[in-house]
Image: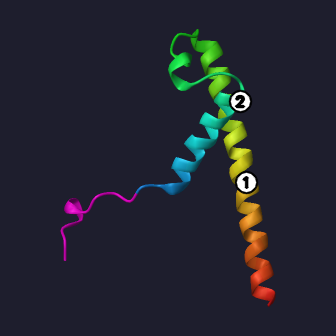
Amino acid sequence: MKDPIDVPPIEDQEAKLERALEDEFLRQKGWNRADLVALPDAERAAILSAASVYASARLAEIGARAHYVNELHREH
């Protein structure tokens, strides 16, 4: 058995999806993460907050759809 320190951490797939959804939001608004560095702190924080809210809503939608599909398959 490997020492736990030798085992690489498992990548959080949901975190990757959340980041991708935030990037999608930014692209839709004409931004990318590199552009945000030049903005004033308050504006950057507002944009990132909106991107986070968007990603959270989409993750909730994806979770609800997955739950619905699982329920459909259980009934059959």
Which corner quadrant of the image does residue 18 belong to?
A: top right
Give how far across and how far down residue 30 sits, in percent.
67, 22
Label 2 environment density (alpha carbons within 10 Å; few <14, some 14–19, many ≥20): few
Task: State the residue at coordinates (57%, 24%).
Answer: 32
Residue located farthest toward the bottom when viewing the structure as drawn: 76
Give how far across and how far down residue 53 sits, in percent.
71, 37
Disc ID at residue 60: 1
Quadrant, the C terminus: bottom right
Q: CA distance from mark 1 to mark 2?
A: 20 Å
55 relative to 36 in the view: left or right: right
| Amino acid marked by disc 1 | Ala
Secondary structure category for the residue under label 1 = helix
Give how far across and how far down residue 20 sits, in percent.
58, 42
Name the residue carrying label 2: 28
65 relative to 42 in the view: left or right: right
Question: Most prominent secondary structure in the magenta stretch?
Answer: loop
